[in-house]
Image (spheres, rainbow, N blue to C red):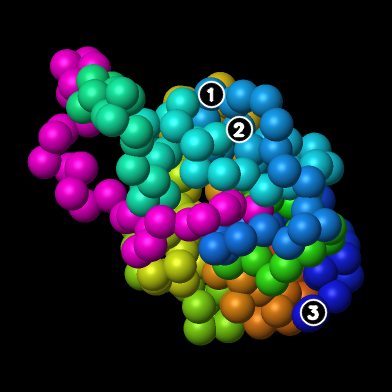
Amino acid sequence: MPDYKALENQFQQILDSKRRPVAVAFRAEAPAAVEKFSGSEPAGCSFWRLAAEGRSFSTAPSDHYNCPVGSYTHNIPLPENRAQELPSILGTMTSLGYLKMEEVPGIPVLKETPGTILYAPLGDTAVDPDVVLFATTAGKLMLLEEAALRAGVLSQQPLLTRPTCMALPAALAHGMVTSAGCIGNRVYTSLGDGEMYAAIPGNALERVAQELETIAAANLALEQHHRGRQQQLSTA
């Protein structure tokens, strides 16, 4: 298994993020040593916040029932007594003009229903993550995108919007994706107005980390170059 603590430190030094990157793993079963989540959260992305704050744990599909949209993107069927919650919230969203119903079939969804979903800060993950989530500013997201492009793992998907949780299946299917988030996610995770997400497939993480060093150094040199040109050529 890669040295995820070292990888986290490397990313954090360059991205200067206030939030720890979050490792997400979809498994049939959780390792016995991983704490099982207990309690209740309003959405699956609430678990991102807990992991970014330092907690490592596994969730059962039922822990995700409170968010019908998140359950949908994670291919988690709602129980019969709650099955109407998805069409209900979709109806609310469409009535507000937030979503068009014809958009729903195009939302990425996990191929299989996970038996458990594990969340942890990247450096503390007990298993190889399937996706790693980074919450960072636009300027740092630029570096991640350029590193992923250099590593050959940047998705051709456009900047994703709502729902934010579709970034996980999208990254698994297409490579690194970026997301502007959605209002629910920003409430449940306390994501700042100046922050956005990158979702990187776990099997591409080391390649992106390696190229990020090159990209960060190149950007620093180019910044100095462009500032010099600005001083020389700007007359207005």
- Closer to us: 212 or 44: 44
Q: Is residue 194 visible?
A: no
The residue shown at (69%, 71%) is 128
Q: Is residue 70 visible?
A: yes
- Closer to us: 103 or 126: 126
Residue 114 position, x and y percent, is 48, 57
Quadrant where the C terminus sits is top right
Amino acid type, mark 1 = Pro
Residue 10 lies, with reference to residue 234, above or below; the image says below
The segment highlighted magenta reads 91-118
- In the image, taking residue 192 as reference, residue 7 lies left or right, namely right
Residue 137 position, x and y percent, is 64, 45
Query: Residue 86 sits in which quadrant?
Result: top left
Quick one: label 1, few (<14), some, or many (20+) residues within 10 Å? some
Count of marks, rendered view = 3
Quadrant where the N terminus sits is bottom right
Q: Secondary structure at mark 2?
A: helix
Point out the tag, 3 or 2, that comes first from the N-terminus.
3
| Pair 3/1: label in front | 1
Q: CA distance from mark 1 to mark 2?
A: 7 Å
